[in-house]
Amino acid sequence: NELKKLLSAYNIEIEGKDYCNYLYSQEKGFVLLSSHIGNFELAGYFIGCNKKRFNSLVFEGETEIVKKNRNKMLLENNIHLIPVKDDMSHIFLINDALGNNEVVGMPADRIFGSQKYVECEFLSKKAKFPIGAFALAVSKEVPIVSIFVMKESFKKYKIYVKQVIADNTINNKKEKIETLVNNFAKQLEDIVLKYPTQWFNYYEFWE
């Protein structure tokens, strides 16, 4: 209730809200792509988590810190944390979540865990983007959506909800995954160009 009061003080505009509502109304779960731009954490509080459980991947060391400080808010908003571990046990938890028709939020702009990637044109140079979230969605046959929560002014946020899709004529899984990764990279590039000061890079995008 305290969080709802706080959020109600903000002016929130959602571009792509109808598609987001459509995804939450479907029986299947979906993969939601995050990135290190804007304030993705707010997405879970602003949209739909009361309709489907939201599972967010976090690094193992961060899990207890986040839970300690925000456990009450996480529980009230139907948000569950999945720690990324060296033993890869998080893969089973992700599969279980999608099997239960829940939402899985995964970072898609930095390589962690698996070193599999697709090289994409990003800000005029080749950059490596991880394929994990895309390969998972293709194998589970669930939709992919990217969300960017951007600050417009002191108390205004604009949320961009974007479909990440591949041409229906593409049957080859590898080609489909590569197309999806490239489409996401272009979406991220567009947002970075529009909100350059809200891109928290701190990462070697280009070698």
Image (cartoon, rainbow, N blue to C red):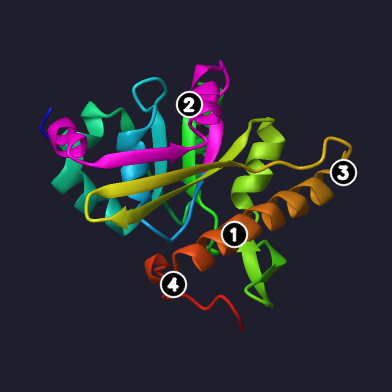
Asked if the stretch drawn in magenta spans residue 75, the answer is no
Q: Nearer the viewer, mark 3 or mark 1?
A: 3
State the SS at label 2.
loop
Distance from Cα at disc 2 to Cα at disc 4: 29 Å
Location of residue 127 (image quadrant) = bottom right
Distance from Cα at disc 2 to Cα at disc 1: 23 Å
The C terminus is located in which quarter? bottom right
State the SS at label 1.
loop
The disc, 3 or 1, on the residue closer to the chain's N-terminal end is 1
Circle number at residue 172: 3
The disc, 2 or 1, on the residue closer to the chain's N-terminal end is 2
Residue range (magenta): 3-32
Residue 115 vs 80, above or below: the answer is below
Q: Nearer the viewer, mark 3 or mark 4?
A: 4
Give the residue drawn at x 61%, y 38%.
144
91 displayed left or right of 165: left
Name the amino acid type tagged 3.
Asn
Distance from Cα at disc 3 to Cα at disc 4: 32 Å
Task: Identify the residue position indicated by label 2 in the image.
Answer: 102
Task: Identify the residue position indicated by label 1 in the image.
Answer: 114
- Residue 28, given in percent of the width and then of the height, sits at 58, 21
Name the amino acid type tagged 4.
Asn
Q: Nearer the viewer, residue 48 or 96?
A: 48
- Residue 14, given in percent of the width and then of the height, sits at 43, 38
Q: Residues within 10 Å of mark 2 (few under 14, many from 20)?
A: many
Q: Nearer the viewer, residue 155 or 107?
A: 155
